[in-house]
Amino acid sequence: MPQSSAPIADRPKLPLLLLLGFTTSTLILIYGARLALFVAPTEATMGNVQRIFYWHVPVDFGALLFPYVNLAGSVWLLTVRNKNQAQAFMADALALAGAELTLLYTSLGLITGMLWARPVWGIWWTWDARLTTFLLLWMLYAAYLILRRFSDSGQVSMQTATLSAVLGIFAAIDVPITFMSIRWWRTQHPAPVLTGEGHLDPSMVPAFLWNLAGWLCWGICLLCLRYLLERRRQRIAEAEALRSIDLPLEVLR
Amino acid sequence: MTFLRHTASHLAKDLRLEWRSREAINGVLFFALLVVIVVSLAFDPTSNPTLAREIAGGILWIAILFASITALNGSWLREQRNGVLDAQRLAPSAPSALFLGKVLANFLFVSVVELVLAPVFAVFYNLHPLGDTRLLALILPLGTWALVVNGTFFAALSLRARSRELLLPLLLLPVILPALLGSIQATAGVLTAELDAGYINFWIRALLAYDIIFTTVSLLLFGVVLNAE
């Protein structure tokens, strides 16, 4: 595909703030890994396997947080799409970034959960309510991305943005159902460690909190990066569209 | 009041069209029957009544689900012919009236199919329900409504996409899975009488809540989907 020189010339560098954010979150994650692997005490009944908890739960927090980014982008898009086209495309980029981050974090949550479940429960997977709803969350945002892929014509299209925003709202309604399911249904998943009857030993708290901070910080940086990338793709597609309108005139000349 | 009148006229139009062609009902009925027969080949339910009771709820809902998806795919196509959908967009009536009329029509079609299918099902699966079968008169409509209201909505949403016949189940299934789970659990609970009455009540209430939430959201957002461009 021939690249037009004008939009590429002002090729934006990776913002310094974002670079700083990625460095910080990597450092926090390394420190968190050290705390989780060497400092935190070994759990009494599960042994070392329990240490995966320090990554599994922060990732699940992220997986329950990023759908709201998608929802915010979707609602924002639906409110401004008839008034302010430029802002609507920003909202669409935000919604897309939120959906992809959700898919990434739910995948990581499911994988770490399975790695934990195999030694502790003796099975990789069980159709317990919490697991099922988490898988459902994964499927909803996979469906969201499939809808975008199917209705995308390679152009910047408000139709794709609007339709996927509608699906984003439907999917977000499922998120609270996921969160409440642990109390609604009988479940094999460990009771909520932070709010339920089981509690986290004070010596384990630092490792958990540092990892939570690290995963959230890293996720937010990745979200910003994906947003900027999508904005850039939109600008290039727009420039292409404008150029193809100009083309016949050039031929005539 | 005008809203209800518009909804009624949309419903009447859909019923009249269906009465003339009988495409949806015949197609759905035959498809559901085929699913029931194919599954019975796999499990041989007549030789084992206990097994039949346990799996019948799931099979019934799978048959209804697959069959309604085939019908829902077609339900907006007849609006696309001759640019009817564009005319609907220009019409001064509320878009949600068009949506509600179509949902009611689809709900009636699928309900008729269920009424025909239920006795056939009982015969082919040698089914002797142990629980209170009157509850099924509550569970089936609630589950069907959840299926049809979301199905009609997502059929409209995927109308403009490439390969829409494939897209509809991909979007519809994740969204209706909670409702499907509730319907299957409640139906199996009634058939086997192994589930506590309180649990069945819980699933019925959950289905009702699901129906209310998703009907509201669909009615609110249908205008956006219809006018998306």
Image (spheres, helix red, strand yellow):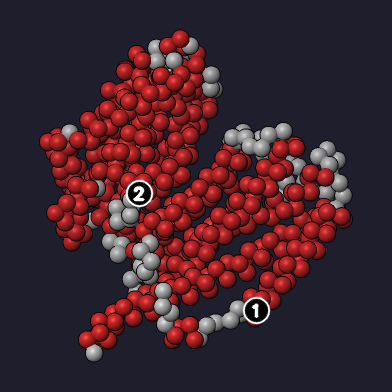
Question: Label 2, on which residue?
Answer: B154
Chain letter of mark 2 equals B
Q: Residue furthest bottom?
A: A253
Camera-side residue of A205 and A18: A18
- Quadrant where the N terminus of chain A lies? bottom left
> Residue B34: horizontal and vertical position, in percent?
32, 25
> Residue A188: horizontal and vertical position, in percent?
66, 35
Q: Separation of disc 2 and disc 1 at Cα? A: 41 Å
Q: Residues within 10 Å of mark 1 (few under 14, many from 20)?
A: few
Q: Residue placed at 14% from the left, 54% from the top?
A: B82
Say which element carries label 1.
helix
Q: Residues within 10 Å of mark 2 (few under 14, many from 20)?
A: many
- Say which amino acid is labelled 1: Leu
- Quadrant where the C terminus of chain A lies? bottom left
Chain letter of mark 1 equals A
Label pair 2/1, CB-CB below 8 angstroms: no
Q: Residue placed at 83% from the left, 38% from the top?
A: A45
Left or right: residue A145 versus residue B147 is right
Question: Label 1, on which residue?
Answer: A17
> Residue B81: horizontal and vertical position, in percent?
17, 51
- Say which amino acid is labelled 2: Phe
Residue B13 visible in this rendered orientation of the protein = yes
